[in-house]
Image (spheres, grey):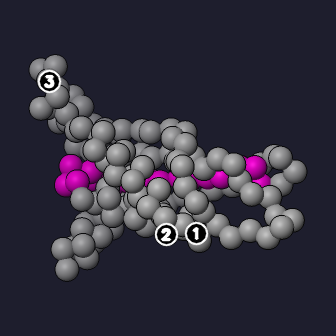
Amino acid sequence: MKSIIELKNLELKLSLGTYGPDDVVPDVHLLHLKLTIDPKFVFIDTDCMDHVFDYDPLIAEIDRLASDGHYHTQERLMTRITAACAAYEVIEAVEIYLSKRPVLRDSGELGVRLNVKAEELAEVRSLMKG
């Protein structure tokens, strides 16, 4: 059994990128997030919040990180989101997809995807602990 919490199309309010006068400046940045967690937090026998993973604090932290200042790259924000996910031991693995649109002539969506497997997330945790 495998459990995934999935967040799609969360519009982040952020300042991202460096653009020239003729560049297309994206007007929306979207976050898609998949969190792999232990099935015991999804396959429950009692309808009680104490038995599930409360993802609201993580979403609030991601929102805070997004509005924390200017980012030159999507990748830096994704790194910080990965660290935020690693702070929760219940999260076993994470997939992050951050996209922006439009890309050219009022069309297109461009994004970066990061898959962090369980052993890699454990490594992030150990780096965070110092």
Mark before the other along the chain sequence, 3 or 2: 3
Q: Is residue 36 above or below residue 118?
A: above
The amino acid type found where label 2 is placed reads Arg
User: Residue, x 18% and y 74% (percent of image)?
Assistant: 129
Badge nearest the viewer, 3 or 2 = 2
Q: Identify the amino acid type marked 1.
A: Thr
Q: CA distance from mark 1 to mark 3?
A: 40 Å
Return the residue at label 3.
48
Q: Is residue 112 left or right of residue 57?
A: right
- What is the secondary structure assignment of the residue under circle 1? loop
- Is residue 100 left or right of 8 when viewed as pictured? right
Mark 1 vs 3, N-terminal side: 3
x 36%, y 38%: residue: 5
What's drawn in magenta, residue-wise? 88-103
Residue 76 is tagged as: 2
Instruction: Let me know if residue 119 appears in the view.
Output: no
Amino acid tagged 3: Cys
Q: Mark 1 — residue?
A: 73
The answer to if 101 sits in the magenta stretch is yes
Instruction: Left or right? Give the position of 4 relative to 1.
Output: right
Residue 11: x and y, percent? Answer: 55, 43
The location of residue 34, given as percent across then percent down, is: 42, 45
Distance of label 2 from label 1 (alpha carbons)? 6 Å
Percent across and percent down for residue 108 are 77, 48
Near-viewer residue (13 or 9): 13
Q: CA distance from mark 3 to mark 2?
A: 36 Å
The reply to whether callout 2 and callout 1 are in contact (CB within 8 Å) is yes
Q: Does residue 112 show up magenta in the picture?
A: no
